[in-house]
Image (tube, helix red, strand yellow):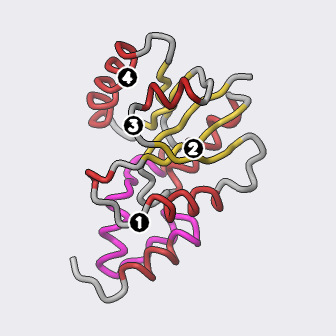
Amino acid sequence: MRTVIYPGSFDPLTNGHLDVVQRAAKLFDRVIVAVAQNESKNPLFSLSERLDMVTQCVAGMKNVETDAFDGLLVNYVEQRSAQAIIRGLRAVSDFEFEFQLALMNRKLNERVETIFMMPKDTYTFLSSRIVKEIARLGGDVSPFVPTLVREALVARLVGTEA
């Protein structure tokens, strides 16, 4: 069984993330969307909230599952018996950082491959950070995130200031 890990903070999950998941699901037997602990990013949503949102959003995809992890990604990949990591690339600016991560992961575990995927061009400008900022300023994020994510953003950010 060919298994791939799609790791990320997913704070919050966007339609761009979902597009990459759907594309990966066509190429692999099993896709594990792995929500990273990563408290250094000061997430808006807790790990359990992010995992719950991702789980609900991918519920209809038969070969996609969700999980949470902490620690080195290559160790998690080994634990889950996966063969590869999927990383989304939106623009050239993403490539340098992602390339460095991929090379470091290869150095840590040469058996783990990294595959870069691009979302649809309609999502290349999209990031969780931008979505949070739009929501924080009262803008409509419904074209960029699933409905339940939009509702969670509105509930969390009501009454907050930028």
* Name of the residue lying farthest toward the right: 62
Circle 4/circle 1 CB separation < 8 Å? no
Q: Which dot, 2 or 3, sits closer to the camera?
A: 3
**Which range of residues does the magenta coloring cover?**
123-149
Corner quadrant of residue 47: bottom left
Q: Which dot, 3 or 4, sits closer to the camera?
A: 3
What is the C-alpha distance between the residues marked 2 and 1? Answer: 17 Å
User: Could you tell me residue 22's position as x and y percent?
Assistant: 65, 43
Three-letter amino acid code at the position of disc 2: Val
Q: Earlier in the sequence, mark 2 or mark 4?
A: 2
For label 3, the residue is 71
What is the C-alpha distance between the residues marked 4 and 1? Answer: 27 Å
* Position above or below: 4 against 155: above
What is the C-alpha distance between the residues marked 3 and 1? Answer: 19 Å
Does the segment drawn in magenta span residue 159? no
What is the C-alpha distance between the residues marked 2 and 3? Answer: 16 Å
> Is disc 4 surrounded by few (<14), some (14 to 19) or many (20+) residues within 10 Å?
some
Depth order, front residue of 27/32: 32
Q: Earlier in the sequence, mark 3 or mark 1?
A: 1
* Name of the residue lying farthest toward the bottom: 159
What is the C-alpha distance between the residues marked 3 and 4? Answer: 16 Å
Q: Which dot, 4 or 1, sits closer to the camera?
A: 1
Secondary structure state at the residue bearing disc 4 = helix
* Position above or below: 7 against 109: below
Secondary structure state at the residue bearing disc 1 = loop
For label 1, the residue is 45
Three-letter amino acid code at the position of disc 1: Phe
What is the C-alpha distance between the residues marked 2 and 4? Answer: 18 Å
